[in-house]
Amino acid sequence: MRTTIIIVFTCMLLLPANGIAQSTCGEMIDYVKTNSYGTTYYSPNSDAISQVSFYDVTDGNYNTYYFAIVRFKSSFTDYIYQVGSNTKSNYAVNYTDSAGKAFWNAIEPYSDVLDCGPD
């Protein structure tokens, strides 16, 4: 069931109403930022993570998809992850102790869903 939802949402991203293919990770980031409000957690004391923003996007059938957009200090580049509904709360509880560890425990396990993380 989860795989089906991911495939359906990915297809929704790839076939927007204007007919332009939206296939790059950057375009997905733009889509999510444009169609939702985010909650951002800043990590000024982290060596690895600059900030993580969480977004919920609801489609026309009232299905909700959850995303984390992560900015790493090494590149100051944004990367998008499609995550589970409880990922935001799991990250929020732990990021002040170690943003990097919170990322590895809460967000990184979803890195294969969109394959938009760093190599």
Image: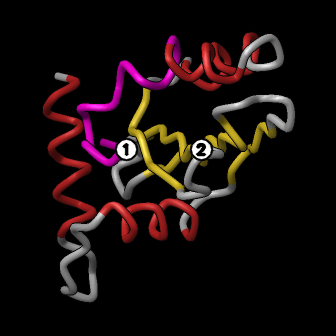
Q: Which residue is mark 2?
A: 72
Residue 11, horizontal then vertical, whole percent? 16, 57
Contact check, label 2 and label 1, Cβ < 8 Å: yes
* Residue 73 appears left or right of 107: right
Above or below, comparing residue 51 to residue 106 in the picture: below
- Seen from the viewer's position, the closer of residues 41 and 21 is 41
How far separated are the C-alphas under marks 2 and 1?
9 Å
Please tell me which residue is depicted at 25% across the width and 73% down the height of the picture.
Answer: 22
- Seen from the viewer's position, the closer of residues 53 and 20 is 53
Q: Which residue is mark 1?
A: 118
Upstream in sequence: badge 2 or badge 1: 2
Q: Name the quadrant containing residue 15.
A: bottom left
Element at badge 2?
strand
Q: Does residue 111 show up magenta in the picture?
A: yes
Residue 90, horizontal then vertical, whole percent? 63, 13
Residue 111, horizontal then vertical, whole percent? 33, 31
Magenta span covers which residues? 105-119
- What is the magenta segment's predominant secondary structure? helix
